[in-house]
Amino acid sequence: MFISAARNIGIDRLAIGLSGLCLVHCVATAVLVLMLATAGGLLLDPRIHEIGLAFAIVLGAVGLGRGIFEHGYMMPSSVGGIGLGTMAASLTFPHGIEEVVISVFGVLVLALGHDLNRRAFA
């Protein structure tokens, strides 16, 4: 049980770290687009966002899903699912400030879900 909980906490920490990288990517992209229009083309490639979302979904499903079975609390998974849904919804917006704001909000909510999951093991 303790080994499984420790493994899940590691997954949650990895997912929180990925959320942080996503946050840095969103903010850095917005700043770079404002400063260097040519750099924005590479960083705003939709594949980066789709691949990042795929990683977030996998880590969310593994980390938050295992949390349900280990500690039995649904709240972390529910909060994380809202964050993932918000991140997915942001992909439907054209590149711009709206997409960045929605993405950042989704990332923060997902990170909160993983943090709640990690704390439920403690």
Image: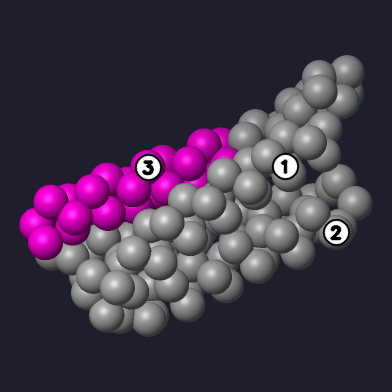
- Horizontal side, residue 84 vs residue 44: left or right: left
Mark 1 closeness class: few <14, some 14–19, many ≥20 residues within 10 Å = many
Q: Tell me which numbered mark, 1 or 3, is placed earlier along the sequence.
A: 3
Q: Which residues are magenta?
A: 1-24
The furthest residue to the left = 2
Q: Which mark is residue 14?
A: 3
Going by the numbered disc 1, the residue's amino acid type is His
If you read the primary sequence from the N terminus, does the residue marked by circle 3 or circle 2 appear first? 3
The answer to whether residue 66 is visible is yes
Identify the residue at image location x=30%, y=80%: 73
Give, as a three-letter code, the residue at label 3.
Answer: Leu
Instruction: Tell me which residue sits at (86%, 46%) in the image.
Output: 95
Cβ atoms under marks 1 and 3 closer than 8 Å: no
Q: Main secondary structure of the magenta part?
A: helix
Dot 3: few (<14), some (14–19), or many (≥20) neighbours within 10 Å? Answer: some
Of 65 and 56, which appears nearest the observer? 65
Query: As displayed, is residue 83 above or below residue 103?
Result: below
The residue lying toward the viewer, choosing from 10 and 25, is 10
- Name the residue located 22 percent from the left edge and 74 percent from the top edge: 71
Expressed as whole percent of the image width and height from the top left, the position of residue 121 reads 18, 65
Q: Position of residue 66 (x, y in %)?
A: 34, 64
- Say the numbered circle drawn on residue 49: 1
Q: Magenta span has 43? A: no
Disc 2 is placed on an element classified as loop
Q: Quadrant of the N terminus?
A: bottom left
Q: CA distance from mark 2 to mark 1?
A: 11 Å
Q: Are marks 2 and 1 in contact (CB under 8 Å)?
A: no
